[in-house]
Amino acid sequence: MRHNVVAYLYCLLRDLYAEHGDPRVAHLPLVGNLWIVLAFVALYLAFVLHYGPKWMAHRRPYELKTVMQVYNVVQVVANTGVFLFGLSNTYLRPGFSWTCQPVDHTDTTPRMMNVLYASYGYYMLKYLDLLDTVFIVLRKKNEQVSFLHVYHHGGMVFGVSVYMTFLGGSHCTMLGIINLLVHSVMYAYYYASSVGALRHLLWWKRRITQLQLLQFGYLTCHFLLVIVRNPCHFPVFIAFIGFIQNIFMFSMFLDFYYKAYIRKHPKRRPEAPHPPSPFPLDK
């Protein structure tokens, strides 16, 4: 019986991806193949939760300051570039709706194809983000590998792969646009603090957490719009998942914000290359 259920679910997912996948992006690597994506996520979880800490148990922490500085610069440039390219082809253009953008796999206009390629760039950045946790493990900062951190990083890879496969250029695009902007600011802050050039701006870590809260609050309303009123016939089930997910993330970040900035703690001296993270998922 159990074997039959697994076989049924496998066939169901296979048919879902084959019949409803977006043909405009089916040729792109890591799009349309659920099993490869799940394999990446499984390898990530296995390393950061078990094999990585076990391998580092009797080793000295790696000094990765320069590597992480280069990584931060790459993240700033990549996130900012994709953000500007994506925004210029979506919400700054007439015809792309802020309130209800449909799923349309037949739209192959140059502008929409630019949106899809920008979305793919964002998707690739979610794999690059996984290095955040790898650096933590190699530096033996295992206390920073929280549930929220791992859940977010692994979940984003999976979630954006689903977006790329089925929902490219749709109402969900807002999530990527906002997240790219937040990451651009966040990694710029990380780099500036690591080189010591802006030590007097370390108070910005609180502002970045507030920016994260604003992000999840806005996205909650963004998905609620198509639950309440849906003139573009966006899949309500997807909107409901986005709505619940962003409420969950807002609650988790609010809990972090309360513990880090409202409830009194003894002051700590910040570490280089990263200060105590305003973004509890990264560093």
Image (spheres, helix red, strand yellow):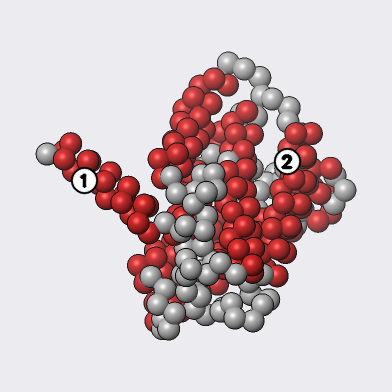
Element at label 2: helix
**Residue nearest the observer in this picture, 114 or 245:** 114
Residue type beneath disc 2:
Tyr
Choose the circle earlier in sequence order: 2 or 1. Answer: 1
Q: Left or right of 271: which side holds 38?
A: left
- The residue drawn where x is 41% and y is 81% is 230
- The residue drawn where x is 73% and y is 41% is 71
User: Seen from this angle, which residue lies furthest top?
Assistant: 58
How dense is the environment of label 1, judged by Cα within 10 Å: few (below 14), some, or many (20 and up)?
few
What residue is disc 1 on?
8
- The residue drawn where x is 42% and y is 73% is 234
Element at label 1: helix
User: Seen from this angle, which residue lies furthest left?
Assistant: 1
- The residue drawn where x is 69% and y is 58% is 82
Q: Position of residue 191 (x, y in %)?
A: 78, 46
In the picture, which quadrant includes the N terminus? top left
Asked where in the image residue 264 lies, by quadrant, the reply is bottom right
Against 281, is 48 above or below? above
What residue is disc 2 on?
71
Against 271, is 58 above or below? above
Q: Is residue 247 visible?
A: no
**Residue nearest the observer in this picture, 52 or 278:** 52
For marks 2 and 1, give the CA distance: 43 Å
Q: Position of residue 268 (x, y in %)?
A: 70, 44
User: Seen from this angle, which residue lies furthest right?
Assistant: 197
Q: Is residue 15 visible?
A: yes
Q: Position of residue 85 (x, y in %)?
A: 71, 63
In the rendered structure, are the residues bearing label 2 and label 1 in contact, judged by CB atoms less than 8 Å apart?
A: no
Residue type beneath disc 1:
Tyr
Q: Left or right of 249: which side holds 12?
A: left
Q: Position of residue 139 (x, y in %)?
A: 65, 29
Q: How many marks?
A: 2
